[in-house]
Image: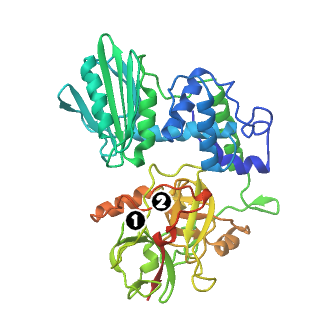
């Protein structure tokens, strides 16, 4: 079954609704959980747990908790009430992420429990007194597995509650103990002990804020039955929704892209515009700087500023708007990314998102277009991830629809939690496409993926820093001091 994010079809469906799009049970119809069987419902619950919205069990029984989780997800990602397409998009996005990280339920024979874990990212288990411990390779997620007697299990939970930075929540039952809270270092934790064959089988999970969804999914998945796969059941309602989405996508791709007279005009094979040129060649234009030009940058740590490489290429001295000189630490023309150091620390900074972009995901571009020409105020525009690759299917980049203008280059592209999903690097040249096809492109812009940014920083011994602004919802307005994290970059 193709893993297609069906929400990328919303624009198509709104222009030309079909039987699969409309009707009482089509993609755009209000979400109805009743046609879903338990396996499909469980898969949707897993997707919403992984997004951080659902905290119930993966039991295949839809409830008010599921309604609230899907409502939160749909509102955050697409600013809309839940639709059938939203449910399918959540599931397929989760399946893509699950494949990337190797998520699957495993059977813990010594505990008699099953649990979902990102096995593709976990290092080898380390033996410790009474159990084992595993970490993901980036250290953001940990799982501990133990067998206890009742008194030791109670002591374990008391210790876990005592380590919480604030009040921990503990639930006690005759055959289960659960304790959850936040540790002093900001990590969330969840530990559960089940009485299985006279032994208190215990699983402890801890996750950094960026991996909160992983903790929720693992916690929700714990159960005494055998492992269940994260697959779309064949012949079910979700499978039919995905088939409808795939059919519409295929029909859209087959339709003439640029009609002139009775035929179609394709983009010529010689279209080889590079995102990374300073500024990009005929097919893309990033609004880059020449001497005396401006771009945008943003802080990822108190003194580290990220921007596009073409913004600072050829500069005698990159600087802030007030003339404060910036030190160029590193740059990569292929990725069109550069990092600068400020002489004074910033009050606020941003954090990179995790995981990467999802097709149809809502995004917000922030920057200083036409700085000093149209004004000096920070601008924020919104749109969606429109393609998961850049020019020539380059997967280091992705396309988005939030409007950008010259001077926006180097700015952050934020997700619905205020994290940096990408670095704005280019927009498709309207003049070039008009000349080549006779059609005017609308809001075709490109960003460098957050994973590429993180890799670039790591290659140069650099990294973002915890703290800063933390999470926020741009749709609700940006927090105080937000403008301190994004700055105009002047090329002198």
Left or right of residue 257: residue 426: left
Nearest the eye: 353 or 454: 353
Q: Of the numbered discs in the image, which one, if any, rests on residue 300?
A: 1
- For the residue labelled by badge 1, is the local secondary structure a helix, a strand or a loop? loop
The residue pinned by badge 2 equals: 420
Q: Of the numbered discs in the image, which one, if any, rests on residue 155?
A: none
Quarter occupied by residue 385: bottom right
Residue 254 visible? The answer is no
Q: Position of residue 369 (x, y in %)?
A: 58, 77
Quarter occupied by residue 34: top right
- Looking at the image, residue 482 lies above or below residue 79: below
**Which residue is painted at 64% across and 73% down in the image?**
432
Measure how far apart labels 1 and 2 are at the Cα level.
9 Å
Name the quarter where the N terminus is drawn: top right
Nearest the eye: 476 or 490: 476
Q: Position of residue 2 (x, y in %)?
A: 57, 37
């Amino acid at each position: 079954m193709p893993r297609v994010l069906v929400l990328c079809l919303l624009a198509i469906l709104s222009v030309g609704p079909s039987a699969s799009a409309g009707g009482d049970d089509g993609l755009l119809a209000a979400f109805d959980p009743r046609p879903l069987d338990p396996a499909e419902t469980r898969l949707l619950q897993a997707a919403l747990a992984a997004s951080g919205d659902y905290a119930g069990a993966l039991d295949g029984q839809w409830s008010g908790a599921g309604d609230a989780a899907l409502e939160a997800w749909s509102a955050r990602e697409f600013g809309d009430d839940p639709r059938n397409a939203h449910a399918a998009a959540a599931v397929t996005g989760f399946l893509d992420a699950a494949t990337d990280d190797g998520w699957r339920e495993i059977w813990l024979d010594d505990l008699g429990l099953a649990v979902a874990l990102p096995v593709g990212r976990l290092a080898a288990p380390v033996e410790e007194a009474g159990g084992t411990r595993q970490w993901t390779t980036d250290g953001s997620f940990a799982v501990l597995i133990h067998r206890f007697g009742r008194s030791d299990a109670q002591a374990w939970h008391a210790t876990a509650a005592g380590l919480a930075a604030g009040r921990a929540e503990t639930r006690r039952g005759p055959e289960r103990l659960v304790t959850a809270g936040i540790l002093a270092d900001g990590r969330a934790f969840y530990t559960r002990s089940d009485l299985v064959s006279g032994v208190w089988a215990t699983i402890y999970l801890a996750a950094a804020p960026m991996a909160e969804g992983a903790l929720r999914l693992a916690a929700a998945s714990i159960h005494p039955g055998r492992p269940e796969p994260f697959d779309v059941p064949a012949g079910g309602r979700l499978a039919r929704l995905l088939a409808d989405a795939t059919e519409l996508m295929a029909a859209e791709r087959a339709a003439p892209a640029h009609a002139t007279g009775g035929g179609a005009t394709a983009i010529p094979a010689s279209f080889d515009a590079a995102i990374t040129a300073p500024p990009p060649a005929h097919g893309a234009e990033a609004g880059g700087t020449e001497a005396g030009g401006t771009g945008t940058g943003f802080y990822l740590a108190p003194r580290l500023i990220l921007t596009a490489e073409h913004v600072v290429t050829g500069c005698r001295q990159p600087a802030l708007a007030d003339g404060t000189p910036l030190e160029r630490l590193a740059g990569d023309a292929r990725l069109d990314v550069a990092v600068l150091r400020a002489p004074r620390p910033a009050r606020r900074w941003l954090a990179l998102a995790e995981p990467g972009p999802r097709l149809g995901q809502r995004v917000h571009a922030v920057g200083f277009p036409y700085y000093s020409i149209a004004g000096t105020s920070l601008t924020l525009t919104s749109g969606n991830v429109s393609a998961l690759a850049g020019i020539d299917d380059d997967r280091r980049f992705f396309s988005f629809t939030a409007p950008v203008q010259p001077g926006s280059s180097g700015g952050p592209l934020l997700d619905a939690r205020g994290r940096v999903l990408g670095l704005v690097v280019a927009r498709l040249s309207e003049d070039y496409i008009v000349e080549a096809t006779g059609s005017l492109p609308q809001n075709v812009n490109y960003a460098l993926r957050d994973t590429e940014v993180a890799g670039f920083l790591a290659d140069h011994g650099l990294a973002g820093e915890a703290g800063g602004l933390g999470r926020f919802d741009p749709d609700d307005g940006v927090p105080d001091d937000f403008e301190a994290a994004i700055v105009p970059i002047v090329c002198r």
